[in-house]
Image (cartoon, grey):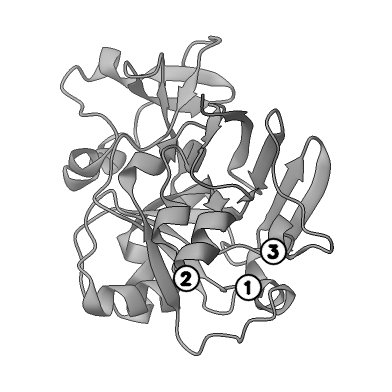
Amino acid sequence: MKLIRFGKSGEERPGLMKDGAIVDLRKLFPEIPDIGPDFFKDQWPERLRHVDHSGTEMKVRLGCPVHTTSKIICLGKNYAEHAKEGHMKTPETPLIFCKTPNTLNGPEDPVLMPRESGKIDWEIELALVIGKQCKRVARKDAFSVIAGYTVMNDVSGREAQFADKQWFRGKSYDGFAPMGPCIVTPDEMGDIQNLRLTTAVDGKIMQDGNTRDMIFDIPAIIENISCDITLEPGDIISTGTPAGVGIFMDPPVTLKPGNVVECMVEGIGTLRNRFILNE
């Protein structure tokens, strides 16, 4: 299944995307919650597996596929070539940090460039959505707690990131986690550790990687994080970015107002976000 949220900002409805058509789930299930913690806690993905409605073709805005979340956990330096391009040591254990829920943004919505930080950068990432509460998940059980996969751009304010000497603020400006266009359930994903990821800025490819190059694969990530942190339904784990971020280019390249950034993960889809000044 491809889970989506569609409609005007603030008025999104849960739906399914089928061959370009949209199934409005509220028409079939008036009681269905928005796609977020309760949606996964109440096992709606499993309840929707047998929906055979073909959907309706409509031109409509797609919203962020997750309405809200208790946390967004991200991986730093999880692709070997990315660590190398930044002249950083390869981590011995997963390096995690958080983005705050205010960063959630739609797959084609504008990203506001904050006044407080210049040097705005892109980072294409495969993100996963947790389907049930869990802690101390063994590697062999890791895939059983995943509700689905999506695309995230871990937008980064490098000026703030480097000035603060830590990542929290530079990663957590409003709208700095464009996500979508859908959540694809695991049964439709194939080999999750062999997916192409690309970023293009105004049509020019900047990142072109593959999830097989992760230093820590998805089971290792879930095992490590859940050892100390209880994961809740609707939590998001973003698994790191391949080489090709702008700040480590020679000379560095960062975003300017009007740039359009397209982030693609094979088997899921593409984000297309225009970056604009926050007046």
Decide which of 47, 211 is in the foreground and name it. Answer: 211
Name which of mark 2 and mark 1 comes first in the sequence. 1
Residue 79 badge:
1
Which amino acid is tagged 3? Asn
In the picture as drawn, the residue positioned furthest to the bottom comes out as 92
Task: Estimate the spatial distance between the alpha carbons at disc 2 and disc 3, rounded to whole Å.
Answer: 29 Å
The kind of secondary structure element at disc 3 is strand
Q: Are marks 3 and 1 in contact (CB under 8 Å)?
A: no
In the displayed structure, would residue 158 be above or below residue 220?
above
Q: How far across and how far down the image is residue 27, in percent?
A: 28, 12
Task: Estimate the spatial distance between the alpha carbons at disc 2 and disc 1, rounded to whole Å.
Answer: 21 Å
Viewer-side label of 2, 3: 2
Viewer-side label of 3, 1: 1
Name which of mark 3 and mark 1 comes first in the sequence. 1
In the displayed structure, would residue 13 be above or below residue 169?
above
Q: Are marks 2 and 1 in contact (CB under 8 Å)?
A: no
The kind of secondary structure element at disc 1 is loop
Decide which of 115, 202 is in the foreground and name it. Answer: 115
The residue that disc 2 covers is 165
Residue 218 badge:
none
Res 201 seen here: yes
